[in-house]
Image (cartoon, rainbow, N blue to C red):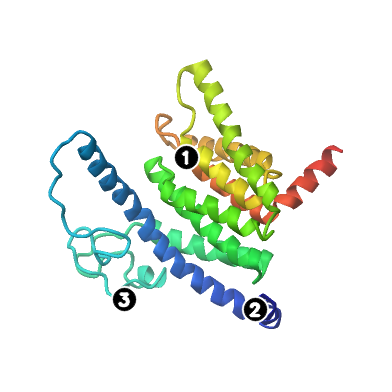
Amino acid sequence: MFDYLSLVQGQYPLLTLLLTMIFGLVIGSFLNVVILRLPVMLDQEWRIQAEDILELPHQEEGATFNLIFPNSHCPKCKTVIKPWQNIPVISYLMLRGKCANCTMGIPLRYPAVELATGIATVIVIYFLGLTPQGIFGCLLTWALIALAVIDYDTKLLPDDITLPFLWFGLAINYFDVFVSFEHAFVGVCVGYLSLWIVFQGFKLVTGKDGMGYGDFKLLALLGAWLGWQPLLLIIILSSFAGVIIAGTLILFGRDRANPIPFGPYLALAGWAALLWGETMIIWYLEMFA
């Protein structure tokens, strides 16, 4: 099947990228739902668990709330969004960024996530092709986008995404999709322990938490997909990106007391390593050889 897809991509490269862009935009629309609703679902789940532990009566349950129900609607007037008002990016432009019923402004973040997902999907397919690496690379890309934005919003990296994708990375590398299973297994161990050791050292010296446990799991996830070899590169790239982006935002007035969590930088560095990790490592070794 993948040989046939590669043949189609070779014969119709522009059409392939166009269809990939459209599909990526649709996935981006779904990611907006995940980014918005998953933290709320987790908060509800944690509240119920806390009530059980403390033997408190449960609060009255409202309407069903998950990734499917209720239908997407305006948070102000509660008008259900019609299908033609939910076309990625295009509907936002047609509605001029406002609700069709009450003219409440629609956050620019929604089309931005859709567009970023579409562009990132095209880049993955362009570099990795319609191959097992390209298809699974898109799945990893979508997970990293969701994790990065959720962490930016809530300072949480949900296990509901991180752990399934960690195990999925190990499963596909059992068949040597990206690296050997041995390298993937070592990548999980090294990815988790490396940041855990840094966390414990920082806490010992300062008495404060320098990062969350979700960061350990995210780097372990990247190790499961990409192996242990690019993990040092990912840490260096994410740290460098953190210094540049955070410094720039502070210059433009961002509050120092509300820093961006480390997860988005790890996700960005991991995505770069997915596509260009080997090239960057070779370039580094040649430059300092």
Viewer-closest of 271 and 84: 271
Question: Residue flagged by tag 1: what amino acid is it?
Answer: Gly
Q: Is residue 150 above or below residue 206?
A: below
Question: Residue flagged by tag 3: what amino acid is it?
Answer: Pro
Residue for badge 1: 214
Question: Which numbered dot is residue 25?
Answer: none
Distance in Å between CA atoms under marks 3 and 2: 33 Å
Residue for badge 3: 83
Residue for badge 2: 1
Q: Is residue 117 left or right of residue 13?
A: left
| First-in-chain label (3 vs 2) | 2
Quadrant of the image occupied by residue 98: bottom left
| First-in-chain label (1 vs 2) | 2
Answer yes or no: is residue 249 visible: no
Q: Is residue 190 above or below residue 15?
A: above
Viewer-closest of 220 and 37: 220
Q: Is residue 93 above or below residue 241?
A: below
Q: Is residue 32 above or below residue 51?
A: below
Element marked by disc 1: helix
Tag 3–tag 2 contact (CB < 8 Å): no
Q: Quadrant of the C terminus?
A: top right
Element marked by disc 2: loop
Distance in Å between CA atoms under marks 1 and 2: 37 Å
